Amino acid sequence: MRHLTLQELQQFSLDILKDVAGFCEKNNIRYSLGYGTMLGAVRHKGFIPWDDDVDIMMPREDYEKFRTIYKSKLYSFIDSRNTPDCYIAFGRVCDTKKTLASSCIPWVKKDVGVWIDIFPVDRVPDDKDTFDRIYDSLLLLMKFNVGIRRVHTISSSRLSVRKRLKTWVLKRTHPRLIKRNPADIVKDMNTLISLVSPAESHHWSQLCCPDSGTNEFFDDDEISEYVKMPFEDSEFFVWKGYDKILRDSYGDFMTLPPENKRRPLQNYISFYWKD
């Protein structure tokens, strides 16, 4: 099988994004480009040249609607509630027909190809100290989840030496922990999120993959309105408060990073064209 080039991966991801965005707009589901995809829209009017994935974010209410009604002739929605052996707490819209992914940190026990990430955004307590404690607890659970998934791929050359060493230590110091099914830890994460998310508050955060730091503490005003922005040959919604969101996450986000940091994030995953 032939590897997808970065350009092919970006184009395939863009096709999935168009399908998802079109479905959302037809069904009154709110979404915003997120993370590097939002940054790409603002700074490059498309993909960050070295970026290899697409992220979108939805308020929890819209995420629940999307995951329930999304239908496509081309792609499939996968999360831990519709796929028992899914090891992530958010959702992905995946190709299963034309491409195939190979990951040394597996996230699902079925063949999937190129995907885009769909992150729910939940209400969180307005008190920042309380939020920080919740975030840290979820981050610990996520680290356990990733560690368990990585235990069985310790010899993979695509893992850095540091990560292989951490995995080796985890395997020997927490023998009972690594026997846990990572899907059970995802259930724990989702349960905790539902318990701590207040019915009313003025702040939001993405808690299902808590690796962006506790500055991901959105005010109502930042994410209550949406604007369309050019992205490659299309336009997609972003939150109107994108400037503050990006500044909180990336600092001087309009300045390119040093060349040695311009590399894809998913370096532990390879994508192939099916024969």
Image (cartoon, rainbow, N blue to C red):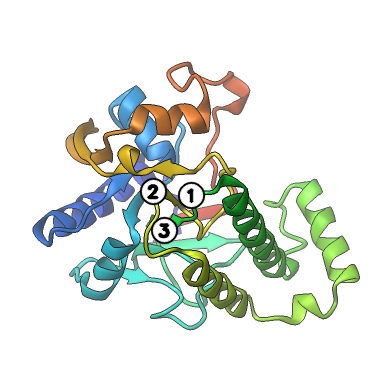
Q: Amino acid at mark 2?
A: His
Q: Earlier in the sequence, mark 2 or mark 1?
A: 1
Residue 2 vertical placement versus 47 (above, below): below
Q: Is residue 49 visible?
A: no
Quote the CA–CA distance across marks 3 and 2: 11 Å
Q: Nearer the viewer, residue 120 or 98?
A: 120
The residue located at (77%, 61%) in the rendering is: 155
The residue located at (46%, 32%) in the rendering is: 50
Q: Earlier in the sequence, mark 3 or mark 2?
A: 3
**Relative to residue 160, is residue 146 drawn left or right?**
left
The residue at the far top in this view is 255
Residue 273 vertical placement versus 266 (above, below): below
Residue 175 vertical placement versus 266 (above, below): below
In terms of secondary structure, where does tag 1 sit?
loop
Q: Amino acid at mark 3?
A: Asp
Residue 269 vertical placement versus 6 (above, below): below
**Relative to residue 238, is residue 160 drawn left or right?**
right
Instruction: Please give the residue where the numbered disc 2 appears in the rendered image.
Output: 202
Quote the CA–CA distance across marks 3 and 1: 12 Å
Foreground mark, 3 or 2, reads 2
Q: Position of residue 215 (x, y in %)?
A: 54, 39
Total marks in image: 3
Instruction: Please give the residue where the numbered disc 1 appears in the rendered image.
Output: 126
Q: Is residue 153 visible?
A: yes
* Quarter the C terminus occupies: bottom left
In terms of secondary structure, where does tag 2 sit?
loop
Instruction: Decide: few, some or many residues near mark 2? Use Cα within 10 Å; few <14, some 14-19, many ≥20.
Output: some
Q: Nearer the viewer, residue 256 or 61?
A: 61
Q: Amino acid at mark 1?
A: Asp
The residue located at (85%, 72%) in the rendering is: 174
Q: Position of residue 191 (x, y in %)?
A: 52, 75
Q: What's the mark number on residue 122?
A: 3
